[in-house]
């Protein structure tokens, strides 16, 4: 079975968040003697493309409305990855030093059209086309409706919703950018008066998956306007929990860490990484360290972080470290908090892959008070590195973290995203940390939880088989 994943992100090629981690791991775990899983991504102007060399395997051009754009299909000259990747190089549109911007309609539409145009030239077509998020959401529509892709009608296709908050809306004025189709069916593109790529995918893809079972259920009640559509299409929707790449995220071999460790020497290993962090950020390594890593956006609850941190630092003798970027107002408020709590609060505003690994290893607790969390990978990385997650029970967080008060519990859970509930949850963390034997027992328990992709990758394969011709 030949599977093609099409995505805007893929670790280590281009990463903004968890989408990259998933698309960079799932194919590895799917590939075996019967399955070949390959990935198609845009060719961006970034550190990965600068550091590697590429060969051009095809040159062509696409029509986007009344414009023509040249594109190349590139492959890596050497094979640094464990799966095949094809790069869509559209120099005039995709090749930027960012993945997303506020006006990406043309970029990602061109990416999708070039991908399908190129697939048309294949001698034998893929058995499954697996799209990820709205950037590839028009592919199921085009496979079903565009005249030029008639040959693809029978290819089963899936779209995975990693985050339904973002839907890729654009105005019907731009409908002419989409390759010609029977205009009687234009309604398939529409949601609420706009062209909505995510809605179009939910209508046209053969199956829709989301990245955790709970998120699938929640989407029927809260999906940024798509609730009725997801309820109506629920028969073809399924939630499959993400896994983690246990080769990349392994404290025993992780080359980003200051000291590697395993279950047997977790205390020594975690402490060495904590000391390094505390030195770098002027924090006291003797105090419990609470950390946050992620995008500073409303869904992550980041708008109330400044108030939460202020209140909890006034009440408790703890340290807090934040790694993230996003909303400029939140960033400024966090910067302003630093001088008020010198030696107890610090933040690195920005993106730093290496630092994130050291934080997973060195922090004592990882905060994830998300308003929306389709799956969340951070909590799973934290578990594997022996760091106790403090989460709001929602989406994938609900499916992966059990509160310490419950049977076999190992994390701290709260129900609402309020300053009071988050600070109370932190207080529970402080109490747990004071009881070191209990803290250390939980640390060992969580490092043994298996969240590798082994099971979920097979769940996808079963799903592919269920729709394969
Ligand atoms: P989301 O995709 O919604 O941002 P996930 O929990 O699925 O959330 O995945 C986030 C991924 O991005 C993790 O690999 C996390 O370590 C990483 N990440 C987020 N922000 C940063 C940052 N500022 N620096 C380094 N890594 C980050
Ligand atoms: C999205 C979600 C996150 C999920 C990730 C990977 O970015 O916000 O919860 O873990 O995709 O599926």
Image (tube, rainbow, N blue to C red):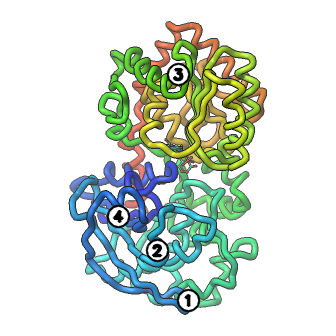
Q: Nearer the viewer, mark 2 or mark 4?
A: 2
- The residue that label 4 is drawn on is 3
| Closer to us: 434 or 164 | 434
Q: Mark 3 vs mark 4: which is more N-terminal?
A: 4
Gap between marks 3 and 2 measured at Cα: 42 Å
For residue 65, the mark is 1
For residue 364, the mark is 3
Residue 422 located left or right of residue 136: right
Residue at 68% across / 41% down in the picture?
302
Q: CB under 8 Å between callouts 3 and 4?
A: no
Badge 2 marks a residue whose secondary structure is: helix
| Closer to us: 453 or 285 | 285
For residue 371, the mark is none
Gap between marks 1 and 4 measured at Cα: 30 Å
Residue at 57% across / 65% down in the picture?
134
Provide residue 96's location: percent of width, then percent of height: 48, 67
What count of labels does the image hold? Answer: 4
């Amino acid at each position: 079975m030949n599977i093609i994943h099409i995505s805007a992100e893929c670790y280590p090629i281009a990463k903004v968040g968890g989408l990259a981690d998933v698309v960079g791991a799932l194919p590895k775990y799917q590939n075996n003697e019967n399955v070949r899983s390959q990935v198609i991504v845009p060719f961006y102007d970034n550190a990965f493309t600068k550091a590697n060399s590429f060969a051009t395997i095809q040159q062509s051009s696409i029509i986007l409305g009344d414009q023509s754009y040249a594109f190349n299909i590139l492959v890596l000259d050497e094979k640094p990855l464990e799966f095949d990747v094809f790069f869509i190089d559209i120099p005039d549109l995709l090749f930027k030093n960012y993945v997303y911007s506020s006006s990406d309609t043309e970029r990602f539409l061109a990416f999708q059209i070039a991908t399908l145009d190129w697939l048309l030239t294949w001698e034998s077509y893929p058995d499954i086309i697996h799209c990820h998020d709205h950037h590839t959401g028009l592919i199921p529509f085009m496979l079903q409706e565009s005249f030029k892709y008639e040959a693809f009608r029978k290819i089963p296709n899936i779209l995975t919703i990693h985050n339904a908050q973002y839907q890729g809306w654009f105005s019907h004025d731009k409908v002419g950018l989409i390759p010609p189709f029977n205009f009687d069916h234009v309604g398939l593109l529409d949601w609420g008066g706009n062209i909505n790529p995510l809605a179009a995918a939910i209508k046209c893809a053969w199956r829709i998956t989301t990245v955790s079972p709970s998120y699938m259920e929640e989407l029927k009640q809260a999906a940024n306007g798509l609730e009725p559509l997801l309820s109506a299409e629920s028969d073809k929707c399924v939630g499959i929990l993400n896994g983690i790449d246990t080769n990349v995220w392994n404290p025993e071999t992780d080359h980003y860490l200051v000291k590697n460790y395993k279950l047997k020497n977790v205390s020594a290993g975690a402490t060495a990484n904590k000391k390094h962090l505390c030195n770098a950020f002027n924090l006291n390594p003797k105090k419990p360290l609470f950390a946050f890593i992620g995008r500073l956006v409303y869904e992550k609850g980041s708008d109330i972080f400044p108030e939460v941190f202020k209140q909890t630092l006034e009440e408790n003798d703890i340290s807090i470290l934040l790694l993230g970027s996003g909303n400029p107002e939140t960033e400024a408020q966090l910067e302003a908090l630093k001088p008020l709590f010198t030696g107890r609060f610090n933040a690195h505003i920005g993106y730093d892959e290496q630092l994130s690994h050291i934080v997973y290893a060195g922090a004592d607790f990882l905060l994830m008070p998300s308003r929306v969390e389709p799956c969340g990978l951070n909590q799973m990385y934290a578990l594997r590195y022996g760091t106790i997650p403090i989460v709001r029970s929602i989406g994938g967080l609900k499916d992966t973290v059990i509160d310490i008060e419950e049977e076999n519990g190992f994390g701290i859970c709260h129900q609402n995203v309020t300053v009071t509930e988050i600070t109370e949850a932190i207080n529970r963390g402080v109490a747990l940390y004071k009881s070191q034997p209990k803290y250390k027992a939980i640390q060992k328990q969580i490092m043994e939880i298996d969240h590798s992709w082994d099971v979920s990758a097979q769940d996808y394969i079963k799903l592919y088989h269920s729709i394969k011709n």
